């Protein structure tokens, strides 16, 4: 590594903020971010069981996923102003305590309402941790290690959602769904200890004037958009409440965007989108995240309700994909250091198209090995496109605006993830209804047909991602 460092320009040898042990400094955030992202998909495999135990419909149970991401999407745009009012340590320690409280509430929930409340409290914590994880990594690691560092962060972002169904499936095979949340607590306590002992403050607390109108517009805009799409899965896209929520969300977000571009000190500096590298990187990250969350929402339910596989075995089936995801996530960051984003991102989206098409061709009698192969294919493509896209986008920002980059990227990533999951749920219902309209009563066949609708949506997202990736530059420094 010394030889690599010696070949770098003098400026590239030093981090923006000098920290004695960068890995220890960021470890608490990595564990907290892992638990946060793990939480986004860990319940997916338990949703069929929860529907029965809590006596709710598919459209209602999806709120355990979209409600969580809704809170993440609401908090993320505020992370930039929060870090200007409070120190890095204060924000992270509060987030970890908040997450522990939310996990305990969820684990002890007597019904759906309290469970959803606990999930939304957890969403607040994830919304605080995610952008700081990126920002701190960009500050404490030297530029020549940046690709590897962002690959490590990408490992958390991609591996945790992929591993969620596997661990949750194993837990559900021997215990109640409540133990999924109890599992979070010791991990978060460890993260808290790392944060107390090693995390340093990396940004100056300036306490600028707070634009409360922007906060209100952000909350209403992003919230209405996610609510509208989520209600569509239950009420249909032509419903008045759906159309009203979507229109309100779009109008308020347009107002919010205009305000962020015109006020002197915006809550979320959307001027970053004027920089081509950041704009393309962020769009690619959004699409990739929409793919992974929509597919990870559909796949565990397809295995259980379409192939009629027990929940514990479902987790085992998804384990190889999780392992492959971890390996590729670790390698993709290093690929960026050597060849840039162009090649790995394009290849990643091509592989994602293949994996989505494989899943769209499944049936009620598909072989287990084929489903595993399709899942593994997705888990190769998603991280291969994710980490280089993130690093390409964030590396395009310099100066004060760089601090807003991760908040912007993570905000839109989570909002698109919530919308993607809600659209997949809606398409699942449409596909089931279309199959049952033929006069058949085959519930497994109907569910598989609905899942196909969702997987075609995943394929379209991957195709769009590939077309946008064609605009990545040939060479990067």
Image: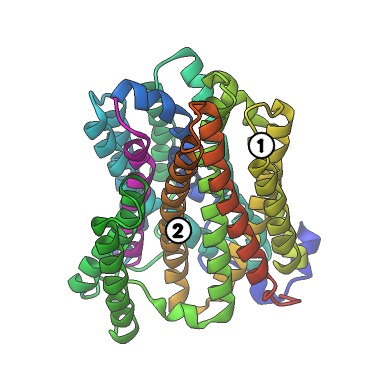
Residue pictured at 48% horizontal, 26% vertical = 441
Q: Which picture quadrant has residue 65?
A: top left
Residue pictured at 54% horizontal, 47% vertical = 453
Percent of width and height locating residue 225: 33, 61
Q: Which residues are magenta?
A: 55-81
The residue closer to the viewer here, 242 or 90, is 242
- Residue at the outermost front position: 439
Question: Residue 362 got which mark?
Answer: 1
The residue labelled by disc 2 is: 416
- Residue at the outermost left position: 212
Percent of width and height locating residue 106: 30, 30
Q: Which picture quadrant has residue 255?
A: bottom left
Query: Quadrant where the C terminus lies?
Result: bottom right
386 with respect to 351 (left or right): left
Percent of width and height locating residue 252: 26, 72
Badge 1: few (under 14), some or many (20 or more) residues near its Cα, within 10 Å? many
| Above or below, comparing residue 172 to residue 262 in the picture | above
């Amino acid at each position: 590594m010394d030889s690599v460092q010696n070949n770098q320009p003098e400026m590239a040898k030093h981090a923006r903020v000098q920290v004695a042990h960068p890995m220890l400094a960021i470890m608490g955030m990595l564990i907290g971010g892992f638990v946060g992202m793990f939480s986004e998909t860990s319940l997916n495999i338990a949703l069929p069981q929860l529907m029965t135990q809590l006596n709710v419909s598919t459209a209602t149970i999806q709120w355990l996923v979209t409600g969580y991401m809704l809170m993440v999407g609401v908090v993320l745009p505020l992370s930039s102003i929060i870090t200007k009012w409070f120190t890095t340590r204060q924000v992270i320690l509060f987030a970890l305590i908040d997450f522990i409280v939310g996990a305990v509430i969820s684990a002890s929930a007597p019904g759906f309402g309290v469970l959803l409340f606990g999930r939304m409290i957890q969403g607040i914590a994830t919304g605080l941790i995610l952008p700081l994880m990126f920002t701190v990594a960009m500050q404490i690691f030297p530029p020549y290690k940046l690709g590897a560092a962002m690959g490590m962060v990408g490992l958390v972002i991609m591996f945790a959602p992929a591993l969620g169904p596997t661990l949750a499936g194993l837990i559900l095979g021997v215990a109640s769904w409540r133990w999924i949340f109890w599992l979070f607590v010791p991990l978060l306590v460890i993260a808290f200890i790392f944060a107390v002992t090693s995390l340093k403050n990396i940004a100056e607390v300036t306490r600028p004037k707070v634009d409360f109108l922007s906060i209100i517009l952000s909350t209403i805009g992003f919230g209405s958009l996610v609510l509208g799409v989520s209600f569509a899965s239950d009420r249909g896209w032509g419903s008045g409440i759906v159309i009203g929520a979507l229109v309100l969300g779009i109008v308020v977000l347009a107002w919010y965007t205009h305000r962020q571009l015109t006020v002197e000190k915006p809550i979320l500096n959307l001027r970053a989108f004027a920089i081509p590298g950041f704009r393309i990187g962020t769009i690619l990250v959004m699409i990739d995240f929409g793919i992974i969350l929509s597919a990870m929402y559909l796949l565990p339910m397809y295995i259980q309700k379409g192939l009629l596989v027990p929940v514990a075995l479902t987790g085992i089936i998804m384990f190889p994909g999780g392992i492959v995801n971890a390996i590729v996530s670790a390698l993709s960051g290093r690929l960026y250091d050597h060849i840039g984003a162009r090649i790995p991102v394009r290849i990643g989206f091509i592989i994602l198209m293949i994996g989505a098409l494989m899943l769209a061709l499944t049936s009620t009698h598909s072989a287990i090995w084929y489903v595993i192969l399709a899942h593994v294919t997705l888990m190769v493509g998603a991280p291969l496109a994710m980490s280089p896209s993130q690093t390409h986008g964030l590396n395009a920002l310099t100066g004060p605006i760089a601090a807003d980059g991760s908040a912007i990227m993570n905000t839109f990533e989570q909002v698109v993830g919530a919308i993607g999951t809600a659209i997949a749920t809606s398409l699942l219902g449409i596909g089931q209804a279309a199959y049952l309209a033929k006069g058949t009563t085959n519930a497994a066949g109907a569910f598989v047909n609905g899942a196909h609708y969702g997987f075609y949506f995943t394929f379209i997202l991957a195709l769009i991602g590939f077309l946008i990736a064609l605009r990545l530059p040939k060479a990067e420094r």
